[in-house]
Image (spheres, rainbow, N blue to C red):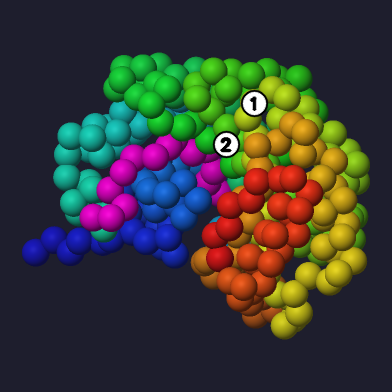
Amino acid sequence: MTTKIHLTTTDHNRDVIGLKYIYPVISRRAGGVSVGINLNVNNACNWRCIYCNVPNLTRGSPPAIELDVLEQELRAFLHDVLHGDFMQQHVNEEDRQLKDIAFSGNGEPTSAKEFPQVLTLVEQVLRDFDLLGKIKVRLITNGSLMDKPLVLESMKHLAKLNGEVWFKVDGGSKDAIARVNDVNLNPESHLQRLRQCAIACPTYIQTCMFSLDGLPPSDADINDYLTLVSQAKDVIKGVHLYGLARRSEQVEVDRLSRLPAEWLEAMGQRIRAHGITVHISP
């Protein structure tokens, strides 16, 4: 007897269909089934966020992308979602909606040098399945490479595919970014990358907030964050504010805990006070 494995928002099992680049998730923020594209199959990223749920995360960039394999997997999986029994086997009835193609995975997607070719590939596949313009194509990114001309050109291409960017901003000061994302980053430089990205393609800020050592973000950290985010309000579409949903695979795991939904809602109201749309996923 075959056991049905139902995906949930807390289970992003990327092995459920056994493919190299393509994996399905139930996305809280997308509101249904998201077809993930993982370009960082070696679990390498140029950041190391302490809440990251990627096991054996390492510093670095992805290996060369096998474009033919990626295309075959994407075509086969979309066929199974649209015409096969994937939804019935793996997705609870209330979540059986195909919402997007999402570049996310186990590292920074734009660090793949083949990213522009992958976008072209996705465009053709969506056209062939009559999905182009009917579902979103999302890039979930730390935004660190948005000052690279080729990456920004890809953002313009993404915009033409009914695309949008979810751009990571977890802190507004150098210290906060180092503490949460484990990178040495100038907030003003990150703000400029955010603005360039948002001008090229519809962009939401994505922010994860949680308790560290039993304490929520400090007033100083919150004020620094609000100062930075408000400087982009004229170009961004809004903020996706979310809490911890899955267990971290980083060494800090035991120091992290979820914030109450009420805390996140109050934080959302502080962001909204700056004239910014906020979507909250506790």
Which residues, given as a range, are shown in magenta?
A: 93-106
Mark 1 = which residue? 201
Residue 263 lies in quadrant: bottom right
**The label number, if any, that marks residue 52 in the structure image:** none
Query: Do the CB atoms of the residues marked 2 and 1 lie less than 8 Å apart?
Result: yes
Q: What amino acid type is highlighted by mark number 1? A: Cys
**Which residue lies at the image location 49% right of the left edge and 31% below the top edge?**
137
Residue shown at 85% from the left, 34% from the top = 192
Instruction: Return the x and y of residue 228 as percentages of the image width and height.
Output: 85, 47
Q: Residues within 10 Å of mark 1 (few under 14, many from 20)?
A: many
Give the quadrant of the N terminus: bottom left
Residue nearest the observer in this picture, 192 or 40: 192
Q: Position of residue 161 (x, y in %)?
A: 50, 21
Residue identified by numbered label 2: 139
* Frontmost residue, 23 versus 199: 199
Q: Secondary structure at mark 2?
A: strand
Q: Residue at x 55, y 60 (%)?
A: 281
Q: Is residue 79 left or right of residue 218?
A: left
User: From where the camera sits, is residue 235 visible?
Assistant: yes
Q: Nearer the viewer, mark 2 or mark 1?
A: 1
Residue 154 visible in the shown view: no
Residue 240 to residue 117: above or below? below
Check disc 1 and report its element: helix, strand or loop. loop
Q: Residue at x 29, y 33 (%)?
A: 78
Give the side of residue 101 with respect to residue 183, left or right.
left
Towards the viewer: 31 or 43 = 31
Amino acid carrying label 2: it is Leu
